[in-house]
Amino acid sequence: MVVFSYIVATLACYTVLHLVGRIATSAGRSRWFWLSYGAFAMGMGIWSMHFVGMLAFSFPFPVAYDLFIVVLSVIAAILASFIALYIVGRDHVTLRQLLVAGVLLASGIVAMHYIGMAAMLIDITYNPLYVILSIIIALVAAIAALWLSFFFRKGERGAAVKKLGSALIMGAAIAGMHYTGMAAAQFYLGNKSQSSMGILLDQQWLGYLISTGTLFTLAFSLLGIYISNKFSTKDSQIQEKTDEIYQMNQNLRVLNENLEQLVQVRTAQLEQARDEAIKANMIKSQFLANMSHELRTPLNAIIGYSEMLSEEAEELGEQVFVEDLGKIRNAGKHLLALINDILDISKVEAGKMEVHLETFELSALIQDVITTVKPLIEKNGNVLESSLEQGEITTDVTKIRQILINLLSNASKFTQNGTLSLEVQRELRNNRTGYSFRIKDTGIGMTPEQVGKLFQPFMQADSSTTRKYGGTGLGLAISHSFCELLGGTIHVESELGAGSLFTCWLPSAVDGDSGNEEQTDEQAYTAYHSGVSILLIDDEPLNHQLMKRYLAGEGWSLAFASSGQEGLELARNLRPKVICLDILMPSMDGWSVLSAIKSDPELRSIPVVICSMTDDNQLGFSLGASEFLTKPISREHLVQVMDKYVSKHRDHTILVIEDDAATSELLTRLLQKEGYFVNQASNGLVALDSMEKVVPKMILLDLMMPEMDGFQFIVELRKRDAWSAIPVVVVTAKSITAADRLKLNGYVKGVIQKGSLDHKSLLAEIGRFIAPEPENE
Amino acid sequence: MQTILLVEDNEMNRDMLSRRLSRKGFRVLTAEDGKEGIDLAQQQHPDLILMDLSLPVMDGWEATRQLKNMEDTKRIPIIVLTAHAMAGDEKEAYRAGCDDFDTKPVDLDRLLGKIHAALTK
């Protein structure tokens, strides 16, 4: 019985030690559940131990128990356990808390013990020494138990053995306290045993009760341990997963950081690679140009000597030599043509191709082209039909000639015994007059894939074509580049086996320069006199053309610079309203240009819009850029952004009142070129009529006119409030008398004498009156 | 017989062109650089000068400029010949004062046309 009581105590302790860990890690309702459960298991354990111990105490006579007090002792045990577990289950326990809890637990156990004793219907006297000893043992046992359970509640490996050890000690302590307490008691039969208060339990019943209690305790303990283990396994699994997730998260973060770094490094590398590629391409083009030149010198000798020898051989009557020398000469000329092609394409790519504009008759050009290609066409048994619209064109005659010869000889090369046709027609495109040249053949044609790479340099539709048909494969690429250089377009429709149709459209007048350096000075000069709106700084000539196409039609005047240095110089000379700046340029990049502009007090106020492949907005904005456009830039977007910085003249209508048609036309064209909207009126009456429909922003007024002259017109104008604010500038050939001046005084903003009419001052005058007006209103 | 002074540094081109021109009935003098060209022109007073542009010692532009600035040589027509295909050569040559311009490789018929035109002016 003694051993049994000890086992029960140990088991209860062991269970509780397990449960403490669980209480500590759980929260909320589950915490209360574990707390209550633990308290119950421990309380029952201690209580069972006590009563098993009592049963082990063999009385010489049967002893009855008072049920009510027995239950009270159970409650005392459970309460004490509850308090102890509550304390131990907390996250942190101070020494003081531990001591207080120990005292509470000990008093609970002691109370349980002595209440249990009191439940015995037998008279007992106590030996005070043993009672105190039992209390001390209870105190030590309780504090040790609490300390141990707090210490072991972290479920480390190998803790199970330690827990068992400490459970044995705690069990021993509780049992020791019990038996010390028993030793303090001296039982004798007295009044109490005779009295019958409440429900009496005889020893047999008590035996059942305690056995049940013990079994319960055991079952609870085992169940508790089992569930606790289950939960703690799950818990540790969850903990493991959480750790894993955390670790993965960490890894991801590290990866992410690495990735960002990698991307930065890679971007820098790509930028550098692009810069290098651009430089390499320029070097390549330069090399090709130089090389072609070097090749031409010996070729010159070959062709010249063979020509000379062939003439001599003819004079000497050596016919065999004449033929062979002719072959050398032809091969030399062929080689020269190929070298010229390479030279052309390199010049285009290096941005060094010049455009020389002249005005000429189309028919003369076409006649010349047909004469040149005729032998080629006849060689393949082809017939050429041509239809031609008469007219003049202003363009680079050598280039248009080369385009047409290329297209025709190409058509002829890929057609056998067929028909070629050349059609020239006047055609309006995007409001520009021009001519379309259609070259059609009935030759081998091309697949869509072949058409796709047709205009790329060094790409013939099929590389086997080169072997079969000869040529560098540069002809079409050159035609394409020339066409763009002249402001036109070229495209092809083709069907395999059915032939091809090449259409080249060229404007009847090429506007402005075409991106070559020679004309920059002239252009800059013109720009200065007309007031440049937009300055584009970009090393790529193609971008100049693109911008021109995009923006010139909007009525802005443009200037171009091909390097940072040139850009700064032009910015100082021209004072544009806005600067579009490329970033990746050789020698002086856009960042340097931007900081140079922003550190120059005179240029600082000019807004700079970055147009680049890079999108390092932050750097751009920190250096003072106003806007950031990433290439490729859409026309719409570009126009929209430019519109913010350069108010377009086109919003302004100017009314020109002038009876002389030639003068009126001259003024109109001048103003339209500046992008103004112009209405014309031949006298004051017509003008008033026109103003009913469109109110102009400004009026240019002649004085001497039929029907209603300038003076009368001004009088009429002042009658209408809405019109009285419109600025009027008088443009007249009349010498203004003092009387005239008096009439005009206060009504007109300025007088310009027709004889002294120079465009610059006229436009400056107009700009002066039109520009500030919206601010005044 | 009319005299043509050919100023050309490349030996083969000089030899070839001078022989071809001789065959066409001209007396041909040759010089290898701009300096020599000026000296010869001053001594011999040729009827026409064919001037290459990239020459050692003194280049064709400078030689042309000097010849056109000297009283006794300024009336001699100068046709500039160049293999330079790069931009600006032609303008630069006219600015130096040449009367005509032709590109190499020489197309003999074309060049003869220019020579006759210059001589009959």
Image (cartoon, coloured by chain):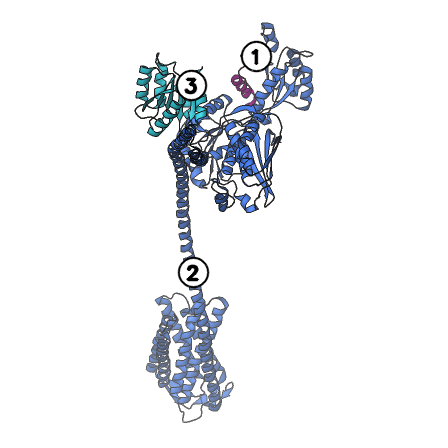
> Which residue carries the number 1 mark?
A754
Quadrant location of the C terminus of chain A in the rendered image? top right
Outermost residue to the bottom: A60
Mark with earlier residue (2, 1): 2
* Amino acid tagged 3: Asp
* Amino acid tagged 1: Lys
Asked if one can make out residue A727 in the rendered structure from this viewpoint, the answer is no
The secondary structure that most of the magenta stretch takes on is: helix
Picture colour for chain B? cyan
> Which residue carries the number 2 mark?
A248
Q: Nearer the viewer, residue A683 or B121?
A: B121
Q: Is residue A225 above or below residue A685?
A: below
* Closer to the eye: label 2 or 1: 1
The crowd level at tag 3 (other Cα within 10 Å; few <14, some 14-19, many 20+) is some
> Which residue carries the number 3 mark?
B99
Q: Position of residue A114 (x, y in %)?
A: 41, 81
Q: CA distance from mark 2 to mark 3?
A: 83 Å
Q: CA distance from mark 2 to mark 1?
A: 84 Å
Boundaries of the magenta span: A751-772
Picture colour for chain A? blue
The lab-note entry on whether marks 2 and 3 share a chain reads: no
At numbered mark 2, what does the secondary structure look like: helix, strand or loop? helix
Quadrant location of the N terminus of chain A in the rendered image? bottom left
